[in-house]
C-alpha cells in the first residue's frame, strides 16, 4: 500500500506570464485567453501517482511581481519546489525572473527551481533567444518551454519538478 | 453582545479565539459564508460556542496553517503587534470562491484570529489591479516596439549613409523624426542632428549642442552603468542602453540610446549614428510608485540592490581590484521598535541609513534591503583589511548616541563582509557569504564585523532552513529528554535531577540545546518546545514516583515561555495530567525572565509556588545579578553559573564571589547548586563552602531515563556522604 505525500510547490514569476493559466491547465485541463490578474494567493491541489505512492501537490499560485507587488517571502515557507514562470514573448520578464531567482535561492536554499518559458504557442512574438537562456542556465535554472494554451509540456513541467524534488520515479 | 455579532456580520469578519489546547473558539454566531467554508471540516460545539481543532483547521486551510506560524510568534511577543496575512482565495466544495484575509491580534489578553471576507469589495479591488496591469502590459509592449523601431531607424540611417554617401541627404530625411538622431564623425564632431534631439536637451540652437561634444557626455553618463561602453565604441561595435542624461539647463532625462558605427571599405570608422528616445515618462511611473527605493530611508531597495550587483558581474575590473560587500543588520532593532513604536523605529532607520551613506565613499552603493538590513557594495577594493576598516568605521558611526523623542538611544550592528576578485562572479554566493558572516557576528555576541570564512557554511546553515527543520522536529516529535543528577552534599533527603532537552536530528544525530535553542527563541518555537519539555518531565517524574523513586526534576523555563499568558495553566495541566507531585517539580528561571517586569514575574512565581512547585534561579552571576532582585524574588534555589565554578582553581575573584553568594543565599534561606563541576579541586572547594548540591561531569553526564534508573542506587549512596570520597560514574 503506497503512502500519500503532501508537498508544497510555488508558482512564482512576473505578472501576466501565465502562472494561473498553467495551474488551471494542469489541475482542471482548462484554458482561457482572457488575462485575469491574480491578487494574493490561491492554492490548488492535485494528486499524482508516482510508483506506488500518491503525491498530493499543494500548488501555491502566488500573485505576479510588478511595481505594486513584491514577492512575500512567508508565502514560500515550506515549499519543496518552485516553478519560476517567464513569458517567452516579453524580454522584461527575464529581468524580473532573474531577480526573483536571487530571492528564491536566499529564502529556499537547495529547493529545486524549474524555469517555465510560457506562451510557446506564440512563435512569431517569441523574444527569448539562446543568450537569454544561457543567463538562466548560469543561475542553475533548467528551463522548459510550455504553453498553457495548447497544454504543451505542462504535465512534463510538473513531472520534472516532482523528479527534481526527489519524488519522481527515479527518486522514490 | 447581539449587536456586536451584527457589526461583525456587517463587516464580514469572523473572530476566533485561540486556546492553549490547540483549539479555536468562534466568538458569537458565525457567518453564513464561514459556515459554507467550514463544510470542509467538522467543528464541534460546547453550548453555543463552535470549536475548531487547530490540526484539522490547518489541514484543510493550508494558507491559514502557514499564517499561524507568524501569528503564534506575534501572540507570544511582548508588544503583541497585529499582523496581516495578505489576501488569499479559498474555494469551497461547490467551487464558490471567497477572497479572505486573516489578521492575528491580541485583544484583552486573548490571542485572536480574525478572518475577513473581502469577496464583496474584491470585484472593485480586482478591477483596479486588472486595469493597472493591463496598462503596464501595454506599456511594456510599447517600449518593446519603440526599441524595435529605434533599432530599425538606426540600421536604415547607416545603410543610407553607406549607399548614398550623402550625410546632408540623410539629415533632411530625419529632420522631423520623433526619435532624436545625431550623426558625428569618429572624433565626436557633430555633423547632423535633428529637432527631437534639440528638444530633449532644451537648447536654443543646434550649434550649442554641437560644441558640447554630446558623444563624450553620453559616454561619461552611461559609464557607471555600462563600463564596457567605451571599449565597445572604440572597437567599432554596435551598442544600446538606457541611462540618465542631463540637459543644458540641468534637467534630467532617461534616454534610450543606440550607437552604431559607419565603416569605410577599409574597415575604419568614419561616423557614428546615434539614435535616442526620451523614456523619462516610462521611468517616472516606476519611480512614482516607489519602485526601486525604500519609502522610509529613500535608499535603493532589495530589488534595486540585486539589479545593481548583477550589473557589476559584467564590469571588468582592473587587475588586483575587487568588489566588496558589507551586509549590515542592526542589533535588537525589533526591541527598540517594539518599545518606542514604529514611528520612532522609522526615524531610527532613516538616521542609521544616513550615517551609513555618509560613512562610505560617494561611489559606493548603499541599499536598504528591508527591515533592519542594509548593504554596502564597494568597488575597486584591494584587500579584506580595507573592507574591515570600512565596516569598523560604520560600526562606530552607528554606535554614536541618537535622540529619539527625547530619549537617548544607542544602537549597534553586526556586519558580515565578503569580497570577490573574480570576473563574472556569482552574485548570489557573494551575498550569501556576507549574510553568513553577519549571522556569525550576531551569534558571537553582536556589535562586531566579521569577514566570511568557508567554515561558516557548515556552522550556520540558512536561518529559515533551520527554522523549518526545527518546526518539522516539533511536528515529528524528534526531541528527547535527558536527566542529569544533582548530588546532595549535606543530606540524603532529596534526590534531584535537571531535565535537559536534546534534538535527535535525523541526519546530524543528537544535538545539544546550544545548537537550536537560540533559533527556537527567535522563531517563537520555544513555546511548543518548552511545553513539551515540561510535559515530558512531569510524565517521567510520575513514572519514577510510581516506581517508588520520588525524584525532584528541575525544568528550564525561557523568558518567552514564562511570559506566555497560558504558562500558569500549562504548569497546572501538566501536573494534573501526569499526577506528578507539585512539590517535586522545580522550574529554573534566569535573570532575563524578570528584567522587563519584575513585579509581574514575582506575582506569577508566587502563584506557582502556592501549587507547591519550587523555583530556582539559573546562571546566577552571569547577568545583572542584582542582590536586590535576589532579596525580592521568591526563589528556593540558586544555581551558581559554571563559568565561576570552572575558574575556581585559577581565579581568586571567582572563589570570593562563590563564597559570598553561598553565604548570602544561606542567609536568605536559599539553597545553592553548583553546576559544571568537573574536578576534585572544584568539588572540595564547594564542599568546604557548604554548597548544597553538586551537578557536573565529575559525577554524571545528562542521561536518558532508563540509564538514570540503572544508577539510582549509586546516586543514593553518593548523596549525603562526602561526595569527594564517593564513587563517580561518568
Image (spheres, helix red, strand yellow):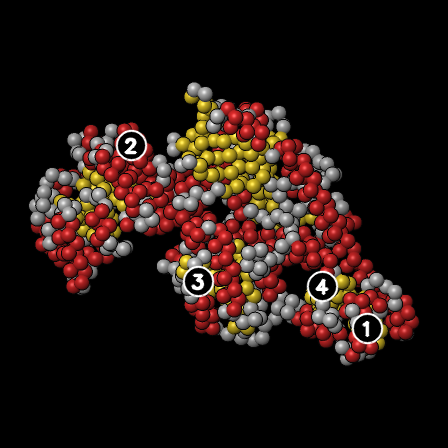
Report the Cα–Cα distance between label 1 and label 2: 86 Å
Residue situated furthest front in the rendering: B406
Q: Residue at 47% across / 28% down in the picture?
A: B27
Report the Cα–Cα distance between label 4 and label 3: 38 Å
What residue sits right under mark 4 in the picture? B254
The disc numbered 4 marks a residue on which chain? B
Same chain assignment for discs 4 and 3: yes
Q: Residue at 23% across / 45% down in the picture?
A: B633
Q: Nearer the viewer, mark 4 or mark 3?
A: 3
In the image, residue A137 lies at what x, y percent?
62, 55
Question: Which one is in front, B185 or B410?
Answer: B410
Query: For residue B448, what is the image quadrant?
Result: bottom left
Report the Cα–Cα distance between label 2 and label 4: 68 Å
Report the Cα–Cα distance between label 3 and label 2: 46 Å
What residue sits right under mark 1 in the picture? B204
Work out whether mark 1 precedes mark 2 in sequence or the reverse, and give the earlier one.
1
What residue sits right under mark 3 in the picture? B402
Horizontally, is B274 left or right of B232 in the view? right
Q: Nearer the viewer, mark 1 or mark 2?
A: 1
Q: On screen, B97 above or below B673?
A: above
Work out whether mark 3 precedes mark 2 in sequence or the reverse, and give the earlier one.
3
| Element at label 3 | strand
The disc numbered 1 marks a residue on which chain? B
Q: Nearer the viewer, mark 1 or mark 4?
A: 1
Same chain assignment for discs 1 and 2: yes
Q: Nearer the viewer, mark 3 or mark 2?
A: 3
What residue sits right under mark 2 in the picture? B572
Examine the rendering and report whether any part of residue B596 can be seen.
yes
Q: Are marks 1 and 2 in contact (CB under 8 Å)?
A: no
Report the Cα–Cα distance between label 1 and label 4: 21 Å
Q: Are marks 2 and 4 in contact (CB under 8 Å)?
A: no
Disc 2 residue crowd, few under 14, some 14–19, many 20+, Cα 10 Å = few
Amino acid at each position: 500500500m503506497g503512502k500519500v505525500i503532501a508537498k508544497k510547490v510555488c508558482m512564482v514569476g512576473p505578472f501576466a506570464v501565465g502562472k494561473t493559466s498553467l495551474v488551471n491547465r494542469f489541475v482542471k485541463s482548462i484554458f482561457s485567453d482572457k488575462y485575469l490578474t491574480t491578487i494574493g494567493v490561491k492554492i490548488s491541489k492535485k494528486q499524482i501517482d508516482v510508483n506506488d505512492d500518491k503525491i498530493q501537490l499543494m500548488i501555491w499560485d502566488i500573485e505576479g511581481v510588478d511595481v505594486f507587488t513584491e514577492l512575500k517571502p512567508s508565502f514560500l515557507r515550506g515549499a519543496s519546489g518552485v516553478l519560476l514562470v517567464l513569458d517567452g514573448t516579453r524580454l522584461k520578464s527575464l529581468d524580473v525572473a532573474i531577480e526573483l531567482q536571487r530571492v528564491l535561492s536566499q529564502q529556499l536554499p537547495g529547493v529545486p527551481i524549474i524555469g517555465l518559458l510560457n506562451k510557446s504557442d506564440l512563435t512569431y512574438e517569441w523574444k527569448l533567444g539562446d543568450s537569454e537562456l544561457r543567463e538562466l542556465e548560469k543561475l542553475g535554472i533548467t528551463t522548459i518551454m510550455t504553453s498553457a494554451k495548447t497544454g504543451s509540456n505542462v504535465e512534463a513541467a510538473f513531472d520534472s519538478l516532482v523528479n527534481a524534488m526527489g519524488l519522481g520515479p527515479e527518486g522514490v | 453582545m447581539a449587536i456586536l455579532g451584527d457589526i461583525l456580520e456587517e463587516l464580514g469578519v469572523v473572530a476566533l479565539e485561540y486556546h492553549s489546547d490547540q483549539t479555536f473558539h468562534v466568538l458569537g454566531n458565525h457567518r453564513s459564508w464561514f459556515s459554507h467554508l467550514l463544510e470542509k471540516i467538522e467543528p464541534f460545539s460546547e453550548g453555543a460556542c463552535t470549536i475548531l481543532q487547530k490540526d484539522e483547521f490547518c489541514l484543510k486551510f493550508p494558507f491559514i496553517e502557514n499564517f499561524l506560524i507568524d501569528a503564534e510568534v506575534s501572540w507570544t511577543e511582548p508588544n503583541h503587534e497585529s499582523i496581516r496575512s495578505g489576501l488569499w482565495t479559498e474555494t469551497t466544495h461547490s467551487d464558490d470562491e471567497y477572497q479572505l484575509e486573516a489578521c492575528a491580534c491580541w485583544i484583552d489578553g486573548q490571542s485572536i484570529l480574525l478572518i475577513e471576507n473581502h469577496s464583496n469589495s474584491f470585484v472593485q479591488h480586482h478591477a483596479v489591479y486588472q486595469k493597472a496591469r493591463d496598462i503596464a502590459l501595454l506599456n511594456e509592449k510599447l517600449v518593446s516596439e519603440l526599441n524595435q523601431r529605434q533599432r530599425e531607424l538606426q540600421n536604415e540611417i547607416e545603410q543610407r549613409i553607406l549607399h548614398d554617401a550623402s550625410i546632408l541627404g540623410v539629415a533632411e530625411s530625419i529632420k522631423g523624426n520623433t526619435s532624436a538622431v545625431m550623426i558625428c564623425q569618429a572624433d565626436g564632431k557633430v555633423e547632423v542632428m535633428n529637432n527631437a534631439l534639440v528638444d530633449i536637451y532644451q537648447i536654443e540652437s543646434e550649434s550649442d549642442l554641437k560644441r558640447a561634444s554630446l558623444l563624450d557626455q553620453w559616454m561619461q553618463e552611461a559609464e557607471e552603468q555600462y563600463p564596457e561602453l567605451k571599449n565597445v565604441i572604440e572597437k567599432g561595435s554596435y551598442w544600446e542602453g538606457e541611462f540618465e542624461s542631463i540637459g543644458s539647463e540641468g534637467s534630467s532625462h532617461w534616454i534610450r540610446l543606440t550607437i552604431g558605427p559607419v565603416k569605410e571599405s577599409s574597415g575604419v570608422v568614419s561616423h557614428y549614428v546615434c539614435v535616442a528616445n526620451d523614456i523619462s515618462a516610462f521611468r517616472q511611473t516606476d519611480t512614482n510608485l516607489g519602485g526601486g527605493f525604500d519609502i522610509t530611508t529613500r535608499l535603493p531597495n532589495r530589488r534595486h540592490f540585486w539589479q545593481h550587483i548583477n550589473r557589476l558581474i559584467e564590469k571588468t575590473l582592473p587587475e588586483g581590484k575587487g568588489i566588496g560587500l558589507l551586509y549590515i543588520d542592526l542589533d535588537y532593532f525589533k526591541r527598540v521598535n517594539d518599545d518606542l513604536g514604529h514611528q520612532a523605529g522609522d526615524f531610527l532607520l532613516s538616521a542609521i541609513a544616513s550615517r551609513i551613506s555618509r560613512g562610505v565613499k560617494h561611489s559606493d552603493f548603499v541599499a536598504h534591503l528591508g527591515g533592519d538590513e542594509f548593504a554596502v557594495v564597494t568597488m575597486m577594493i584591494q584587500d579584506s583589511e580595507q573592507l574591515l576598516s570600512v565596516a569598523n568605521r560604520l560600526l562606530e558611526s552607528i554606535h554614536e548616541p541618537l535622540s529619539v523623542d527625547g530619549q537617548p538611544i544607542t544602537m549597534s550592528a553586526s556586519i558580515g563582509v565578503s569580497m570577490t576578485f573574480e570576473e563574472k562572479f556569482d552574485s548570489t554566493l557573494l551575498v550569501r557569504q556576507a549574510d553568513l558572516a553577519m549571522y556569525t557576528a550576531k551569534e558571537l555576541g553582536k556589535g562586531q564585523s566579521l569577514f566570511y570564512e568557508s567554515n561558516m557554511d557548515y556552522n550556520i546553515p540558512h536561518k529559515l532552513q533551520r527554522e523549518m527543520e526545527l518546526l518539522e522536529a516539533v511536528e515529528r516529535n524528534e526531541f528527547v529528554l535527558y536527566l542529569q543528577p544533582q548530588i546532595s552534599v549535606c543530606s540524603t533527603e532529596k534526590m534531584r535531577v535537571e531535565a535537559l532537552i536534546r534534538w535527535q536530528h535525523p541526519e546530524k544525530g543528537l544535538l545539544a540545546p546550544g545548537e537550536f535553542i537560540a533559533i527556537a527563541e527567535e522563531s517563537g518555537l520555544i513555546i511548543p518546545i518548552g511545553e513539551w519539555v515540561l510535559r515530558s518531565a512531569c510524565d517521567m517524574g510520575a513514572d519514577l514516583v510510581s516506581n517508588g523513586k520520588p525524584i525532584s526534576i528541575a525544568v528550564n523555563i525561557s523568558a518567552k515561555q514564562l511570559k506566555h499568558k497560558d504558562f500558569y495553566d500549562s504548569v497546572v495541566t501538566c501536573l494534573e495530567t501526569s499526577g506528578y507531585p507539585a512539590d517535586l517539580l522545580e522550574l529554573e528561571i534566569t535573570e532575563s525572565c524578570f528584567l522587563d517586569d519584575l513585579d509581574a514575574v514575582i506575582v506569577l512565581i508566587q502563584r506557582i509556588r502556592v501549587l507547591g512547585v519550587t523555583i530556582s534561579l539559573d546562571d546566577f552571576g552571569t547577568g545583572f545579578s542584582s542582590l536586590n532582585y535576589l532579596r525580592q524574588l521568591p526563589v528556593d534555589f540558586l544555581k551558581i553559573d559554571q563559568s565561576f565554578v570552572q575558574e575556581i582553581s585559577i581565579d581568586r575573584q571567582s572563589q570570593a564571589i562563590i563564597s559570598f553568594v553561598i553565604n548570602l543565599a544561606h542567609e536568605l534561606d536559599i539553597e545553592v547548586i553548583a553546576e559544571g563541576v568537573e574536578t576534585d579541586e572544584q568539588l572540595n572547594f564547594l564542599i568546604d563552602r557548604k554548597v548544597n548540591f553538586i551537578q557536573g561531569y565529575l559525577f554524571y553526564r545528562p542521561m536518558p531515563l532508563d540509564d538514570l534508573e540503572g544508577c539510582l542506587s549509586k546516586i543514593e549512596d553518593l548523596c549525603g556522604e562526602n561526595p569527594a570520597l564517593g564513587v563517580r560514574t561518568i
